[in-house]
Image (cartoon, rainbow, N blue to C red):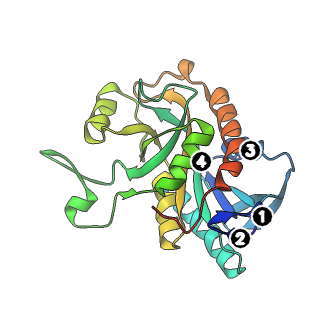
Amino acid sequence: MVLQAQEGRLTTSAVRVLVTTAVPAERDAVAGAFTDGTTEVGLPAGTLLRTAGGYDLLAAGVGPALAAAGTATALTAAALEGRPYALVVSAGIAGGFQPEAPVGSLVVADEITAADLGAETAEGFVPVTALGFGTISHRPPNSLVRAISAATGARPGTVLTVSTVTGTAPRAAALRARHPRALAEAMEGFGVAEAAAAHGVPVLEIRAVSNAVGPRDRAAWRIGDALAALTAAFGKLAPALESWNPHDHR
């Protein structure tokens, strides 16, 4: 779909969207929402799956660095083609903070925050912003978060980006103490958001909860259920975008 706005709304040929996931299983779960199928498009950062409806799906790799690099590559390629994206979505599965984000539920970020970008000190963790550098948070457009939440049932809140997945109760408690609005943690959202911000493109993060944040218990993980929830969410996302004005960054 090519971006066309009429009377503040998007037409049915509306939004060209880049969806970045970590791994192919997540990308394929998103692709499952599009019944018209996909075609492959090669990029230096990997292979895009392109839908007839204007969604490009990229499995960029695990972690914020690969997510940023892959997203930036796709955004640059689109800009050079003269067909820039109107929106970037970081999508996939995640750990959920209990009890607010139970396994199988959906979360949409109203704040994307790098949880461990900073320094450890004798007094505790200090974010990089307190050291006088950079940023640690990006905020998706509130109007879009509300639309996606209403359409999919996803709970809005902070999604943390970590470079090391939480595996203990003390680490989970420490993250919640620093980020009391946190609903989930994943490893790519902040990298995707940094690349989107560099290109002046709005960003969104949608996560399906596959496990609880805390002690690692692989027997309790529900990855299949979370991937199915991701497919269902994207089946409802496209209609929700039709009512969103891409120039509304509130």
Camera-side residue of 173 and 88: 88
| Type of amino acid under label 4 | Ala
Residue 12 visible within the image: yes
Give the amino acid type for the residue marked by disc 3 in the picture: Asp
Left or right for 231, reference 114:
right
Q: Residues within 10 Å of mark 4 (few under 14, many from 20)?
A: many
Q: Position of residue 175 (x, y in %)?
A: 31, 38
Can you identify the residue that label 2 sits on? Answer: 4
Q: Nearer the viewer, residue 206 or 7?
A: 7
Quadrant the C terminus occupies: bottom left
**Measured from the top left, where is residue 217 in percent x and y?**
49, 21
Q: Residue furthest right?
A: 36
Name the residue beneath numbered marker 1: 13
Mark 2 closeness class: few <14, some 14–19, many ≥20 residues within 10 Å: some
User: Which residue position is annotated with label 4?
Assistant: 91
Amino acid type of the residue tagged 2 in the rendering: Gln
